[in-house]
Image: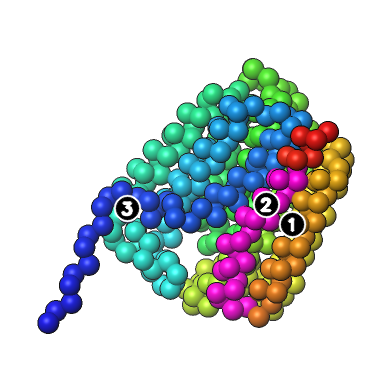
Amino acid sequence: MRPAATPARSRLAIYLDLIRWNRPAGWLLLLWPTLSALWIASDGRPGWHLVLVFTLGTILMRSAGCCANDVADRDFDRHVRRTAQRPVTSGELSVREALLVGAALALLAFVLVLTTNPPTIALSFFALGVALAYPFAKRVFAMPQAVLGVAFSFGIPMAFTAALGGSDWRLSTLLAALPPVAWGLFAANLFWVLAYDTEYAMVDREDDLRIGIKTSAITLGKWDVAGVMAFYCVYIYSWTLLGIRVGLGGWFLLGMAAATAQAVWHYSLIRNRRREECFKAFRQNHWLGFAVFAGTVVDLALR
């Protein structure tokens, strides 16, 4: 007796799989530092309009990024156990259709950006360019996670320009809306991305070595665990100093302490380099970001 054929999935189900709708960790990793920066830039009063713009925009752009990434990596993904069944790689969705979905999502995100101000609109083009470049970085750079770090941190300067930017297109207006703390937070967040995406790369290391992909986990070799923990240390130390510099106090420090405790827990997960535990560490990182965000919000609210 033949086994029953697997029923074809609906187009909606395929699209939701394409944008990782059932795996929100990706957009949460983008969201928490962006909102933390928005709260700092607006001194705790960002307004519901900007909160909505950056929340929805983050979800849309991460989803669009998944479309672009899956198209760029479709020939690699079929050789990786974890990604072989992604819609584009498996042939369930055509390249053209995936690109159209991604373009539509990016366009919706741009419409949201248009409701902000000229400096933020200008930065959005740079953010899009970096997001589109990342899938190809792993073919060239030994640490492509650094490129992802730039892409995943770009919401921070955009949050500052949205809160502090003016209404004209002059370069001086853009620069005036980006104080040193904005770039400091941007740089610090890059190290957090390096930490959690190296954990992610540790999951696929064997497959990536076989197919010739470059990742930070491969580049760091036996120093991968030490590298991840060093990245966490730089991120937490830098973000803490910057928070103190802008006047954040006890509640913020409590949030950073909670983030530190989670980083230590992640060490216990990744130290043996087991796939499942490395993937768990990656997936739970959004709680670390939430701890930083929550501490920031509460501290600013209770001033």
- Alpha-carbon span between mark 1 and mark 2: 7 Å
Magenta residues (range) = 273-296
Which quadrant is home to the N terminus? bottom left
Q: Disc 1 on helix, strand or loop?
A: helix
The residue identified by callout 3 is 13
Left or right: 191 as drawn, with respect to 80? right
Q: Disc 2 on helix, strand or loop?
A: helix
In the rendered image of this protein, does residue 68 appear above or below residue 37?
below
Along the polypeptide, which appears first: circle 1 or circle 3? Answer: 3
Left or right: 208 as drawn, with respect to 199? left
- Alpha-carbon span between mark 1 and mark 3: 35 Å
Number of the label disc, if any, that sits on residue 140: none
The residue identified by callout 2 is 289
Give percent across and percent down for residue 261.
76, 63
Give percent across and percent down for residue 223.
72, 75
Q: Disc 3 on helix, strand or loop?
A: helix
Q: Is residue 204 magenta?
A: no
Marks 1 & 2, CB-CB < 8 Å contact: yes
The residue sitting at 73% across, 23% down in the picture is 172
Q: Quadrant of residue 264?
A: bottom right
Please identify the residue farthest to the top as the structure is shown.
168
Q: Could one spot residue 162 in this view of the protein?
A: yes
Name the one closer to the observer, 116 or 45: 45
In the rendered image of this protein, does residue 109 appear above or below residue 191?
above
- Alpha-carbon span between mark 3 and mark 2: 29 Å
Please identify the residue farthest to the front as the structure is shown.
302
Left or right: 143 as drawn, with respect to 205? right
